């Protein structure tokens, strides 16, 4: 297994990481590894598929929305 040494971690970040390690019943090293795995295992976004979906949705809108309508729709269901 490879080894990495981190220096100069800001104290607030270190404290948050240490607290998270305690909450997850892990060592600090294990928490860092788990955090890195979450970051690097995220699903890659398929930009072409996302743009195609946006085009399809956009084609279903007739006319244009004015600001008031846009904000009303955007905030629908929000407290």
Image (cartoon, grey):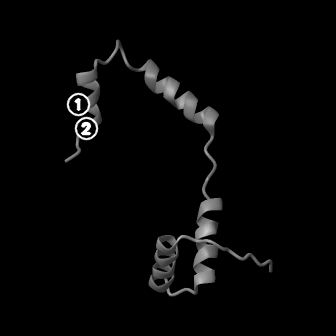
Picture residue at 29% right of the left edge, 26% below the top? 70
In the rendered image, the residue lying farthest to the left is 79
Picture residue at 23% right of the left edge, 23% below the top? 68
Which image quarter: residue 67? Answer: top left
In the rendered image, the residue lying farthest to the right is 1
Q: Is residue 5 left or right of residue 17?
A: right
Picture residue at 58% right of the left edge, 70% below the top? 35
Q: Residues within 10 Å of mark 1 (few under 14, many from 20)?
A: few
Compute the Cα span from label 2 to label 1.
Answer: 5 Å
Q: Nearer the viewer, residue 29 or 74?
A: 29
Residue 24 pos. (x, y %):
49, 82
Q: Residues within 10 Å of mark 2 (few under 14, many from 20)?
A: few
**SS at badge 2:** loop
Q: Nearer the viewer, residue 61 or 42?
A: 42
Instruction: State whether residue 26 is above or below residue 2.
Output: below
Instruction: State whether residue 71 is above or below residue 10.
Output: above
Residue 7 pos. (x, y %):
66, 74
Residue 9 pos. (x, y %):
58, 71
**SS at badge 1:** helix
Q: Is residue 63 left or right of residue 2?
A: left
Q: Nearer the viewer, residue 62 or 9?
A: 9
Which residue bears the numbered disc 2?
75
In the rendered image, the residue lying farthest to the top is 63
Location of the N terminus by quadrant is bottom right
Which residue bears the numbered disc 1?
72
Given contact means CB atoms under 8 Å apart, are the residues at marks 2 and 1 in contact? yes
Instruction: State whether residue 9 is above or below residue 53.
Output: below
Q: Nearer the viewer, residue 17 or 6?
A: 6
């Amino acid at each position: 297994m490879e080894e990495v040494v981190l220096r100069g971690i800001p104290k607030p970040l270190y404290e948050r990481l240490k607290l998270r390690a305690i909450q997850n019943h892990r060592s600090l090293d294990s928490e860092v590894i788990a955090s890195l795995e979450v970051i690097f295992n995220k699903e890659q976004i398929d930009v072409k598929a996302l743009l195609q979906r946006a085009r399809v949705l956009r084609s279903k809108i007739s006319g244009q929305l004015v600001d008031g309508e846009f904000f009303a729709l955007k905030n629908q269901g929000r407290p």
